[in-house]
Amino acid sequence: MAINLHFADPDTIHNIVNRRGDFQRPTKELKLLELYGPCISTAKWDDWPRHRKVMATPFNETIMKFVWEESVRQTKGMVQLWASASTTGVASYQKDTRTLSLNVLAATGFRKLYDFRGSTEPIIDEIGSYRDSLQTVLDNIILLMLVPFRVLCMMPGNWARIGNAGIVFKQHMAKMLDDEITALNQGKSGSGGIMSTFVRAADMHRADHENSKKGLSIDEIFGNPFVINFAGHDTTANTLAFAMLLLAAYLEVQDWLAAESATVTRGQPVEACDYKEIFPRLERCRAVIYETLRLYPPVPALPSIASNGTQKLDVGDGTLCIPEGTNLTVNLRAMQVHPQYWSDGVAWRPSRWILGPAPADSPTAEQLSKEQFFVPSKQIFFPWGEGPQICPGKKFAEVETVAVMAYLFKAHRLEVKKHTGETDSEVRKRIDDCLDDMDLEMLVRLRDAYRVTLICEEA
């Protein structure tokens, strides 16, 4: 039996997050993430900075223009497919947002370019390609964490297919690594993706072989790209799925976004606009994402464990003496809806993130320029984590999701396909029931998104 303490007090949480040596990640429990090798998520604190330095390098401002452009390209493909199904409705917005997110990450991080393919389109190569082998791995992540690939391959039918996908994905990573090494040895610049950074990290690790405190080993180079795909793909995809369903319930918020997108783009197509000019001005699009993350954080709680002896922790007017080995849980969702810090905290209201709001309909460029994004205390809102262990992909996720919002709602609207004889109140209840029906399979997600079918039409 173990003791687990849950916290939703901002001051206490700030103390826990920043005392990284006293309250460390439960690395033993996280070992399951080492599907392909040791990684940043399972590294002990004294070894964590080495992983972080390498992981943060490719997620810099220089790639954000590419993230924006690829996100817009993928959204364009998704919207074309959705709009063509205006009679039957979108087959699976949850699966489609996963495809979009996977394609953006594959292109940006690993220079694997794919056109958008909807959930109803025929599968061309379910296992052999990088994207499809990775998708199969991510779709069956818990099984693959528990059963070795080679064991699954010896089993019949679908089991063998899943095990084979796990093997093929590692083969893709190995080939990308070999290709980068060859390019760099020939004096070329390489792909410019994440693997280029990892090859340099491998060289540093070999040069520092005596103490191994620099760069990454080959096993770690396989482990970390998988974690990037897992953490950077499903987190964004699930957030977009929640946002699509919420926006279909709040048609006025779609109009609110459209007014901003039309004004900021000045009549030009979103794909023709410059990232550096347009992204900082799409505050309403960002507000939708932040409000969705507030209510539906992909990781609703952050675990840690008391380390290095008994630790004292101030909580309100008292002090807790926490024995070494005690589990602590930072309850993000409880804190992010707490009425002491959030007015009407359980309501989805993106406008709460905009200070000095312009008129909802047809705002002028001058009026929009005066809107300011509300920046809450880092002690009450940090869905990407906080302190030294903040997610290096935060800006990546923001750019991708804002691009999706800006493109989709500039010229299109989402609504729920009604059942025969269904009233507006019954539709709303069905949406609410779908939103309330969540599970936690590694990350928070809709358990049964199929109960609500969306229709996408031109505005």
Image: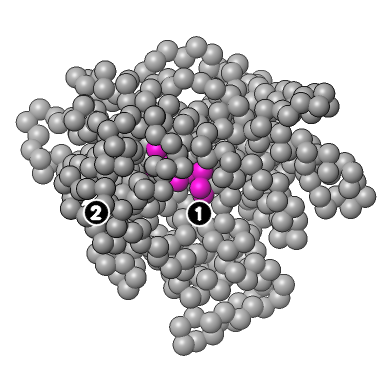
Q: Quadrant of the C terminus?
A: top left
In which quarter of the view is residue 229 placed? Answer: top right
From which residue to which does the magenta span run?
A: 394-403
Q: Nearer the viewer, residue 292 or 375?
A: 375
Location of residue 426 in the rendering, given as x and y in whole percent from the top left corner: 12, 41
Quadrant (top left/top right/bottom left/bottom right) for the N terminus: bottom right
* Whether residue 144 is visible: no
Q: Which amino acid lies under the numbered mark 1 shown in the image of this protein?
A: Trp
Q: Which residue is mark 1?
A: 384
Q: Quick check: 269 above or below 239?
A: above
Question: Judging from the image, what secondary structure is the residue with disc 1 in?
Answer: loop
Magenta stretch: residue 139 in it?
Answer: no
Residue 234 image position (x, y, % from top left) = 48, 39
Nearest the viewer among 131 and 23 is 131
Outermost residue toward the right? Answer: 210
Instruction: State the image coordinates of residue 155 (x, y, percent, origin top left).
Output: 62, 21
Q: Determine if residue 165 is in view.
A: yes
Q: Residue at x 42, y 12 (%)?
A: 122
Q: Nearer the viewer, mark 1 or mark 2?
A: 2
Q: Residues within 10 Å of mark 2 (few under 14, many from 20)?
A: few
Please state the horizontal and vertical placement of residue 32, each as a whole percent of the image.
Answer: 64, 44
Question: At label 2, which amino acid type do we have?
Answer: Gln
Q: Earlier in the sequence, mark 1 or mark 2?
A: 2
Residue at the spot 30% in from the left edge and 70% down from the top edge = 339
**Residue located beneath label 2 in the image:** 367
Residue located 50% across and 54% down the image: 384
Q: Magenta segment, principal secondary structure?
A: helix
